[in-house]
Image (spheres, rainbow, N blue to C red):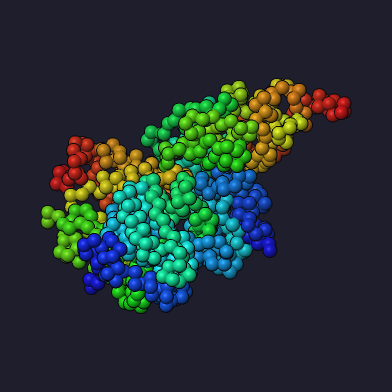
Amino acid sequence: MGRKILLENSDIPNIKSFDVFRAHGGYVSVEKALKTMAPDEIIEEVKKSGLRGRGGAGFPTGLKWTFLDRKSNKPRYLVCNGDESEPGTFKDRYLMEKLPHLLIEGMICSSFALGVNTAYIYIRGEFKYLLGILNQAINEAYKNGFLGKNILGTNFSLDMYVHPGAGAYICGEETALLESLEGNRGNPRIKPPFPAVVGLYDCPTVVNNVETLANVGYIVNFGGDAYASIGLGKSTGTKLISACGNINNPGVYEIELGMSVEDFIYKEEFCGGIKDKLELKAVVPGGSSVPIVPKELILFTASGEKRLMTYESLAEGGFESGTMLGSGGFIVYDQNACIVRNTWNFSRFYHHESCGQCSPCREGTGWMEKILWRIEHGHGNMKDIDLLISIADKIEGNTICPLGDAAAWPVASAIRHFREDFIFHVQYPEIVKNIKHGALYKYDNQD
Amino acid sequence: MMLKITIDNQTIEVEEGTTILQAARKIGGSVVPPAMCWYSKLEGSGGKCRTCLVKVSEGSAKDPRPLPKLVASCRTPVVDGMVVQNKTSPEVLEARKAIVEFLLINHPLDCPVCDQAGECDLQDLSYDNGKVSCRYQESRREFEVIDIGNLIKLHMNRCILCYRCVYVADQIAGKRVHGILYRGDVSEISTYIKNSIDHNFSGNVIDVCPVGALTDKTFRFKNRVWFLKPMTAHRDCPTCSGKVIAWMRGSEIYRITGRKDEFGEVEEFICNECRFEKKNINDWIVEGPTTLKRHSVISQNHYKEIKTPSIINPLKEKMEKQTNDE
C-alpha cells in the first residue's frame, strides 16, 4: 500500500520544467515506445493494465482505444479532457499544474499507439493560469525534440495544442467538448455516432481524461502487468482523490485502489478524520453527481462488508445502498451539515449548467432547484419531497447526455437516505427560516 | 440490403440508414411516435425534445439484447431485426407523459390568445399524453415579445427550444443571424444584437415552429385558424414553387402557409413574397379544399381525427368556372 505512480515526484522543486522532469526519469517511456514498441503493443499493454477512465465513468481505456475507427483514411485525433468542472473534483488541475510534462509524456505515447498526429488538451475556461504552464511545457517539449516532426529521429510526428473553454460544465461531456473545440456552442451531440467514429471535425477521435493519459507513461515503462499488480481486482492502479469538506486535511491524495474508505477518512496521512472531532454524517465519494451515502453505508456495504476505495466496492448495492467512485471528488459532511441545503446547492449548479438542449434536463433541473429552494427556505410542503423523487426519476435516462442523470442522482439519493432532514425542513419552517446561513445550517439540537 | 424492423408488432422492411421514426412513419397509424423537434427536411435536427423516445426491446437479429435506455427514434438508425415498442410499452408512455409535463411547465398555456391554437403540435401532444392537473407551482420563465424583422414576431415564452428555426435559418434562409443565446432553461432564440432576419425564405421559420413562438405578423389576431378554410392554391412564383395553402374566409385570404403533410411537415418551403404579400384572391389559382390528414383540434370543440374533408367548398362553382375557362 502507498505506492505512487503519478505524484511520486510532485514535490521535487521545479519539476514543472523540462530539465528537472527529464532528470527524474521523464520522457523515458517516449523513447521506449517510439524506438522499441509497435503501436499495437502499447494498446495491448494498456489493455493488460486494466486502466479505467479516470474522468468518472470508469470505462476501460484499452477497450475504448480499440473502438477507434482505423479503416477510414481520415486523420485521427487525441483529445485530453481537462475540463474538470465537477464540484468536489480538483485532481486534474493539480496534476497539470504540478506535472505538466507527465501529461504530455503520456499523450505522446498514447498518440503513437493510436496513430494520431494532432493532439489537443482542452482545459476549462477557469483554468486560465494553467494555459501558460501547459504552453510552456509544450514549447519545451518541442524544443527538445519530443514534439513536432520526426520525434527522436523516427517518422512519427505529433503536434499538440492547448485550448481553453469558455467556462461550461457541460463541455466536460466528450461530444460537447468536441463541439466547443470546433468553435461551436458546447452542446452535446446525439449518439450514435460515437466520437471513436465521428469525432472532432468528423474524424475518429479518442477523448481521455488527464489522469488516464498521465498513467500511460508508467504502463509503457513498466508494462501492463506491473500496473495491474497495483490495486484490487478490476480496479487497477492508483487513483487521485481530491478530498474536501469537513475533514482535517483536505487535498489531493494518490491512493492505491483497494484501500478501505474508513482508513482514507480517518488515517492521519489522508483525510485525518473529521474536523473539530465531530461525527461523520455523509460522504459523496465521486464528485457532486454521484449519490450521497450516509455514514453507515459508506464505511460498510449493506451486507456488512468493509467498503473499499474501488469502482466495484463503492458501487455495491446499486443505487439503493451504494454509490460510485466517479471522478474521485471525495466530499465529507460532518454531523452538522444540512443535507437539504447541500442538495439545493448541487441542484442549483446543475440548473445553471444545463445546456438547454433537451427538454427533461432543461426544465427538470430548474424545477428541482426551485422546489429545493422552497424547502430549504421554509416554504416547502410534504408533497414536494415525493415530487422531487418523481422529477428526478423522469429526468434520469431520458436525456441526451449524462448531465441529466448527474442532476437527478444527488437529489434522489439525498431523499432516499436523508428523508428526515427534508421532513424537518417542512415541519419546522420557522426554525429553518430564522437561521442565518453563514455556514451550513446547524439544526440538529433545536427542537 | 433491406433491414427488417418490427414496431409495435408490425413489421416492415426499410433501407439502410433509415431511422426508427422514419420506419414508423412508413407503417403509419398509431405506431408513429410524436416528433416535436425532428424535421425530415432539416439536416441535424432532432434528438432534443425527447417526445419520440421508444423502447428497443431487441437490439438486432445478431444481438437480441434490449438497449438499456429509451432511445430517440428520430435519430436512431434501424438495425436489422430490431424490435421496437412505442405505444405498447408502458415505460415509453410514462416517459412521454413526463416529457409533456416538462415541456408545459414553462409554457404560458395562453392558447386562448395564441395564434397557433388549433394547429399546434404541443396542443395535440398534450391532448394525447398530458395530464389534467399541473404539479408545477413555481414561477414560469418570462421573456419580452420581440420582432424578428418586420414580418415575424417571436414569443419566447411559448418556445420549446426545438431548434428547428435555427436550422431553417442556417440551411434555407442563408446568412444566419439568429440562434440560441444563453443556456439551460433561460436559453432563448434570438437574433444577435437585435438583428432582423432579412432573407426571402425567412418566413419558413413560422411553418416549422411546432408551437406559437414564431408567428406571422400579417396574420396575428386576425382570425382563429378553425374559422378559416384551408384551400390548396398555387401561383407562378419566380423564387419558389408557389404551391401553398391559402387560409380563407369567404373569398378573403387571411394567410398563406406552405403545404403540410400528415406529419405536419412542410412539403416545399415557400418564399416570403408568396407568404406575406400575396393576400389577394386574384394572385392565386385556388385548386380546392385541402384534405387534412392529420390529428388536429381544428374541428371546433371536438378533438377528433379528421379523415375526410368535412368542409364544404364555398368556391366550388367559381373554381369550376375558372377551370373551364382555362
Q: How many marks?
A: 0
Residue located at (17% from left, 65% from top): A269
Residue located at (26% from left, 38% from top): A377
Residue located at (42% from left, 54% from top): A173
Return the x and y of residue A6 as percentages of the image width and height.
Answer: 29, 66
Vertical arrangement, residue B20 with respect to residue A212, above or below: above
Q: Quadrant of residue B201?
A: top right
Q: Quadrant of residue A413?
A: bottom left
Q: Nearer the viewer, residue A249 or A15?
A: A15
Return the x and y of residue A302 as percentages of the image width and height.
Answer: 28, 65
Query: In which quadrant is the C terminus of chain A drawn?
Result: top left
Q: Is residue A213 left or right of residue A24?
A: right
Residue located at (39% from left, 54% from top): A162
Q: Is residue A46 left or right of residue B122?
A: left
Vertical arrangement, residue A237 with respect to residue B173, above or below: below
Q: Is residue B150 left or right of residue A167?
A: right
- Residue extending farthest to the left is A277
Residue B105 in view in this figure: no
Return the x and y of residue A34 as percentages of the image width and height.
Answer: 42, 73
Query: In which quadrant is the N terminus of chain A drawn?
Result: bottom left
Return the x and y of residue B127 as percentages of the image width and height.
Answer: 55, 39
Vertical arrangement, residue A394 with respect to residue A28, above or below: above
Q: Nearer the viewer, residue A294 or A216?
A: A216
Q: Quadrant of residue A226?
A: bottom left
